[in-house]
Image (spheres, grey):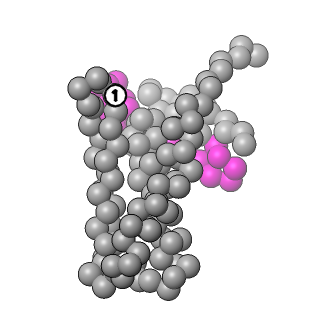
Amino acid sequence: MEININILDGAKLEAKVGPYVVTSDQAKEDGGQGTAPNPFEYFAASVGLCAAHYANEFCKQRNISTEGMKITEKISKNAEGKLVFTLELKLPSDFPKKYEDVIKVSIGNCAVKKAIVSQPVFELKMV
């Protein structure tokens, strides 16, 4: 995978991901115009989006409605200063009880979470 990043006006950036363009900005108090999420907010959102994708796929495979399903993500720091991503899953009222533990396992297979947990290597090359 290759993602090309361009620096735009002010604090705006754009990432070209295949045929898609994602724009980021900084909040006004951080020198931006506040026109888009900042890079960390995109990163954080990807955790919740990935979890929701796995929940959606789980339900689709079992013909379970996702109407009323919601994931709320909260980010905090623990006593050691490490980030804690807490996902709160609200299941539909008619969600089968027998799948409650299983959907948690499915969401735990989220590719974004797995990438973070594996502690990827970051390299910077001057070209």
Q: Is residue 88 magenta?
A: no
Query: Considering the image in quadrants, where does the N terminus appear?
Result: top right
Image location (x, y in percent) of residue 124: 65, 18
Q: Nearer the viewer, residue 15 or 67?
A: 67
Q: Residues within 10 Å of mark 1 (few under 14, many from 20)?
A: few
* Vertical relation: 124 (above or below) 99: above
Q: Above or below — where is 34 with respect to 21?
A: above
Seen at 49% across and 63% down, the residue is 106
Between residue 14 and residue 69, name the one nearer to us.
69
Q: Magenta stretch?
A: 16-34
Residue in the picture at 31% in, 72% down = 91
**Res 26 quadrant in image:** top left
Q: Can residue 43 be seen in the rendering of this structure?
A: yes
**Residue extending farthest right:** 127
Q: Amino acid at mark 1?
A: Lys
Write down the residue under mark 1: 82
What residue do we see at 47% from left, 55% from top?
108
Whether residue 23 appears in magenta in the rendering, the answer is yes
Residue 28, x across and y down, in percent: 29, 31
Vertical side of 110 occupied by 54: above or below:
below
Instruction: Note whether residue 53 is visible.
Output: no
Image quadrant assignment for residue 79: top left
Residue at 41% across, 62% down: 104
User: Measured from the top left, where is residue 45 in percent x and y?
Assistant: 41, 48
Location of the C terminus (image quadrant): top right
- Give the residue at the far left of this rendering: 79
Q: Position of residue 18 (x, y in %)?
A: 69, 50
Q: Which secondary structure, mark 1?
A: loop
Please give left or right for residue 26 compared with residue 113 in the image: left
* Quarter of the figure with residue 32: top left
